[in-house]
Amino acid sequence: MTEQHPDDLRPVDLFDEGLPVLPDQTSDDTDLGWGEWSSGSDDSRYLEERPPHWD
């Protein structure tokens, strides 16, 4: 049998719904953070800006 330390017996809640450690996206990683207006969806822009070899 091994010797148990106090940390081995301490319960740990793995489902704590507290504040996130890091946000998923920072405010400067957005269009508004770069001073641009967010248009919502970029799908139409991505479809228009196709590489030449796709045509």
Image: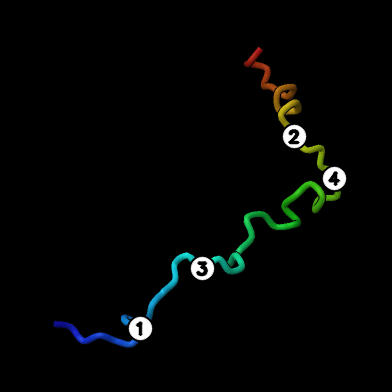
Q: Amino acid at mark 3?
A: Asp
Q: Which residue is mark 4?
A: 36
Q: Amino acid at mark 4?
A: Glu
Crowding at label 1, few (<14), some or many (≥20) Cα neighbours within 10 Å? few
Distance in Å between CA atoms under marks 3 and 4: 36 Å
User: Does residue 14 sit above or below 30 in this rendering?
Assistant: below
Q: Which mark is residue 16?
A: 3
Q: Secondary structure at mark 1?
A: helix
Image position, residue 47 (x, y; %): 70, 23
**Camera-nearest residue between 47 and 16:** 16
Asked if residue 41 is positioned above or below residue 23 in the image, the reply reads: above
Instruction: Indicate which label's residue lies in the foreground, 4 or 2.
Output: 2
Q: Is residue 1 left or right of residue 43?
A: left
User: Mark number for residue 52?
Assistant: none
Q: Earlier in the sequence, mark 1 or mark 2?
A: 1
Q: CA distance from mark 1 to mark 3?
A: 18 Å
Q: Quadrant of residue 24?
A: bottom right
The residue under label 2 is 41
Q: Nearer the viewer, mark 4 or mark 1?
A: 1
- What's under tag 1, amino acid-wise? Asp
- Confirm or deny contact between disc 1 and disc 3 (CB under 8 A): no
Name the front one of labels 3 and 4. 3
- Outermost residue on the top side: it is 55
Real-space Cα separation, disc 4 to disc 2, in angstroms: 14 Å
Residue at (80, 53) in percent of width and height: 33
Question: Which of the numbered marks, if any, corresponds to residue 7?
Answer: 1
Q: CA distance from mark 4 to mark 1?
A: 49 Å
Q: In the image, 1: left or right of 7?
A: left
